[in-house]
Structure formats: structure tokens, C-alpha cells
Amino acid sequence: MAEVDAVAARRMTGTLFIERGLRSPSSTRFWSLLVLAAVIASAGVVGDSTATVIGAMIVAPLMTPILGCALALVLADRRQVVRCALLVLGGALAVVAIGMLLGWIAAPPDAFASNSQVSARISPRLIDLLAALATGTVGAFALVRSDISDTLPGVAIAISLVPPLAVTGLLLTVHRYHDAGQSALLFATNVAAIVATGTVVFLCYGVRAGAEKAALRVGRFRGRTLAAVACVLVLVAAPLTVGTLSVARDRLLAADARPVAERWAASGTWEVASVEARNGIVVIGILGLPPQPAPSELRAALDTNGMRDADLELHLVGGRTLWCPTRTDTCTVRVGGRS
């Protein structure tokens, strides 16, 4: 494995370490692209447009300070570690704020309940961590090897950084706090994976030796740095394990609820548009003309078929939502979706 030389070390630090001044070229580029990416991602999520969200992934510059954290850890440059970490945190908060702003302007009546872009980012699992580890490795590898830098656009699409933050902001505006936390967890998962894999790749390629040849600041690297990175990965993996199990249970619940809902809707002129489960809650979308079937009958049918412990949320055409909790035969109207 060829080690990084002095020229490559200078190129990497110049690429990943954003200058301090707000008016510096690298700083203005970072913040300008970040704001634009946040607007594009938020608009793409609101419009449920996959192509628009992919465009935001390509534009987003957040991977720069995240890999900068990994490089600073390898070089044991505490000042740059703090600066890169603050850039990641500040950038994340900026994207969430922009998402909240667009959410206040354009939140749909169903509180994003039927939005596929939102649904894809509120159930992080262990497989997401595995994908992030692989993608982070490719990103670090592409920076070390300038001859394969053409892969970076693909890395930008594969790793989800700005979209889950935009989803977090949008969901906060409609009071879906648990789901907002889940999308933030997806972002944290990707950040932890990029830092971990970047640190390992940079160490393996001898970046420290190249930086010393380039007369760059290089401190004493300690084993506890790797231990800290490993601990962060473990901390992230724990809720992802819980999420993986929760997703599996929700899929079984949705599979059991669908035939029950279809039989209930068939008693009238309504049609079941969607059936899913979120955190043990059965969420059903229905379409049709008045009169609607009695929601209490669906609640009773779910109870009869072994789903007595699952709350029921009905999304009707026009944006009205009915909430039918467990162990009751009454349903209440919720305006603007679930709180």
C-alpha cells in the first residue's frame, strides 16, 4: 500500500480544512453550498421528489468537515478537530433551521404521513450503519488516491447527510418529535461512520508521515483516539439495533393489519390506499366518497384479530385524521396529523 507523500498531504489538508475567516473562499463556498443544499433538500422532501433530494446530496458540502475531523484526529491537531466538529454541528443546525422554515410555510395537512422521502429516513437500522461504513471508506479512499476522485459524486449520493437533517426540521414543525429524533439519528450514524472509516483509512495510508514531510502540524497520536471513535460507533449502534427490531415488528403488524383494513373498507365505497405501522401504531390511508365506514368498526376488527395493543391512525381524503387508541371504541379527529 503506497503511503501519502508530502504533496498529497498538503492537498488533503487544503481540501478538508476550511479556513477560519467567514469571507475566505473555502468558508464562503461551504456555507453558500450548504444553505442551497438545505433549501433543495427541504423542497425535495416537501414535494416528495427523489430527483430533487439527490440533487441536494450532490451539492451538500458537509462531508468536507466530517472527513476533516477524521484527518485532524489522525494528525492529532486538536485545534482542527474542534473547528471541524463545530462546522459540522453549526452546519447541521443551519439545515434543521431551514427545514423548519420551509415546514412552517409548506407543511401538508397530513403532517408528511404519506411522504416517501420522510418515511425512508425515520427508521434507521443497522444496515444503514453498514452502508455508511462502506461509503465512508470509499470517500476517504478517494481523497487519499487522487486518481479515483471521480467516485466522490457517487459517494455524495450514497451517504445521506443533508436530507435527514431537512426531514428533522420539517418534522419538528408538525410536532412529530420522535420521528425527528430518528432522522437526526440517521445523520449521526453517517457522521460517526465517516469519521471512523476516515480515521482508519488515513492511518493505513500513512498520512501522518506525509504530513510530517510537508512540515504540517502533527501531534502525538494516542490509542485512546481510536478507542473513543469505536465507543461512538457502539453508542450509535445500540439505538440502531433497537430500531432494526422495531422495524421488523412494524412490518409484521402492517402485514396483519392490511387484510383486516381491506375487509372493513369493502363494506362501503372506500378503498385502502396505504397500510403501514410506525412504532407499534397502525397507520392506514383511505380514499372514497361519503358516507365513510365507521372507524370504530375497524378498531374492533383489529382487536378481534390480535392487534388490541396497537393504536390506530386513519388518514382520510382531504387531510382529516382520526385517532383510535387501544382499549376504546371511540375515535377522535386530529387536525394536521398526529402530535
Image (cartoon, rainbow, N blue to C red):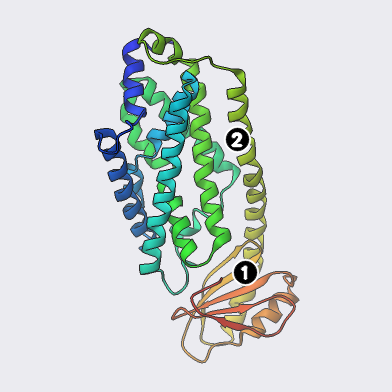
Marked residue nearer the N-terminal end (2 or 1)? 2
Task: Please name the amino acid that badge 1 sits on.
Answer: Val
Q: Nearer the viewer, residue 72 or 178?
A: 72
Closest to the camera, between mark 2 and mark 1, is: 2
Instruction: Say if residue 39 shows up in the picture.
Output: yes
Which residue is drawn at the image coordinates 34% and 59% (left, top)? Answer: 43
Residue at mark 1: 282
The amino acid on which the numbered mark 2 sits, given as a three-letter code, is Leu
Gap between marks 2 and 1, in whole Å?
32 Å
Q: Which residue is mark 2?
A: 233
Q: Position of residue 198 (x, y in %)?
A: 47, 27
Tell me residue 163's x, y (percent): 41, 51
Left/right placement of residue 333 relative to residue 212 reads right
Category of crowding for the residue at label 1, using alpha-carbon neighbours closer than 10 angstroms: few (below 14), some (14–19), many (at least 20): many
Q: Is residue 291 above or below residue 194?
A: below
Q: Tell me where residue 227 sits by quadrant.
A: top right
Q: Is 305 left, or right, of 184 in this rendering? A: right
**Residue name at image x 45 percent, y 58 percent:** 169
The quadrant the N terminus occupies is: top left
Q: Is residue 138 visible?
A: no
Vertical order, 19 against 89 (above or below): above
Q: Which mark is residue 124?
A: none
Give the percent coordinates (x, y) of residue 73.
50, 24
